[in-house]
Image: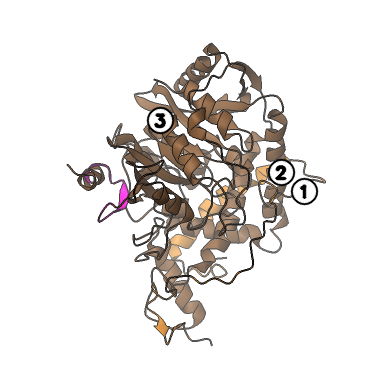
Amino acid sequence: MSMLEQAHRINQRYRAFNHVAESLEAEGGGRLAGFHVSVKDNVCVKGMPSTAGSKVLEGYTPPFDATVVAKCRLEGAAILGKTAQDEFGFGTFNVNTPYSIPLNPHDTGRSPGGSSGGAAVVTAVADFPHLAIAESTGGSISCPASFCGVVGVTPTYGRTSRWGLIDYANSLDKIGCMGKTVRDAALLLSVISGPDRYDSTVLHAPVEDYGAQAGEPVEGLRVGVPKEYFGEGVDQGVSDVVWGGVKRLEDQGAEVREVSLPFTRYSLSSYYIIAMAEASTNLAKYCGLRYGLQLPLVGSFDEYFSAVRSVGFGDEAKRRIILGTYARMAGYRDAYYLKALKVRTRVIEDFRRVYRDVDVLAAPTMPVVAPRFDEIADMEPIQHYMMDILTVAPNLAGVPMVSVPCGESHGMPVGLHIMADYLGEGDMIRAATAAEAS
Amino acid sequence: MAEAARLNLTDEELERYQKQLKVILEAFRMLDEVDTEGVEPSFHPIELEDVLRDDEPSRWSWDPLANSMHKEDGYFRGPRIQ
């Protein structure tokens, strides 16, 4: 069976793609020669429809490759297709989209997690050399990686170029990657990291060979276990499996100690206010004129734009646009938006302080295993947001993180979250390989 | 708020969002507990350095109008300004 036939079969079974490539083209040798790379739908691939999971971008076909995609092609990868996601990344279970709602390969009655759900599904089931480009704003790589039992890497903010990303929240968006093993994901991380003339927010620090860090000894590595990440709301079965992963690190000579990040409990509100405020300004560009969903030109400017936006945006997008607009409005800006940015400073200080004493942090990625779709249907929006309690803090601070499969609970995969200091991807990869369940 | 965000909402949406947003905004007020006296806001997670590139003219190689159905003589065509 050809690779494309396999991709279509994965799609029939798990609805993981929004678009499968018409043909596979790879240019010669390189570090990714022989690999097939799937790309989250919000990252532009030349000639492939890219909707970011939104109807407002229906029919949009980018005439260019995002920088990370161009880098993959230069290293010999073939692009397999565009993977399913929540609309613009607005979701934790990949159910907020009018396109494909992917199914968890471990139990198709359960969500694969979001928002990079399709990426995690393809990574879990592909039995050919495959890597995934994914993206995280508040946990959209870690969550599906944890729920599907794959490795998901979110780099330091600015480690990878965001050029060609259909953005959600500029100060939070990070393009990252997934693989079946830490070594695979680390290889792709090295390829997509580094400066880009089209994105002035990219860090110019040298790019290490992260793949070479995989499997390096962890003896003497200082691992902090933040007590706030094992509290109320975290499933006992998940906790137990995660402690098993921490034990593996300790058995290999890592020094494990308990640490505290006291502002953790405030990170969820801070994150959602900032993310929604930035999203509401970013989404102002969708006016139905230049690309994506377009209607016959009827009525005034405001009437036309409002008509396009009202049919183009889904439920969660509308909710976030309204909340974000509110948080930025005169009279409320200080109480919500500015307050959230100041609390973010406190959260960043938490991480900076703790990284003086430890090299990496280890915690559960998600408080639970993948929920069933019927459970999700009964949840209110605020309960969806609460699911992100463990992933938003590092995303708000912009530190790198990886979710690595470390066992099972209730018959479903459990992810261990390794978070490192800014540009500490090397330590992070080393720790992740040591904790990886074999 | 919906008007400011250029969204036409149905009565059903208005009612549902009002209920949901009330709950969410109340939860957000938890931030009032944090003492942020004298704390600077973090618009970005990390300090960014200015990096300048050579000031050379360049041109995109693609057609910016390629994805639009509203165009005329090389321009985008918009709705009437009233």
Q: Colour of chain A?
A: brown
Residue A302 visible at all = yes
Q: Nearer the viewer, mark 1 or mark 3?
A: 3
Q: Residue A151 has which mark?
A: none
Q: Residue A111 at x, y = what percent?
A: 36, 39
Q: Residue A181 has which mark?
A: 3
Q: Colour of chain B?
A: orange
Chain at tag 3? A
- Quarter assignment of residue A368: top left
Q: CA distance from mark 2 to mark 1?
A: 7 Å
Magenta residue check for A250: no
User: Which residue in the rendered view is the most extreme toward the right?
Assistant: B38
Q: Nearer the viewer, residue A144 or B33?
A: A144
Q: Residue A414 at x, y = what percent?
A: 43, 27
Q: Are marks 2 and 1 in contact (CB under 8 Å)?
A: yes
Residue on which the image places disc 1: B40
Under mark 3, the amino acid is: Thr
Q: CA distance from mark 3 to mark 2?
A: 34 Å
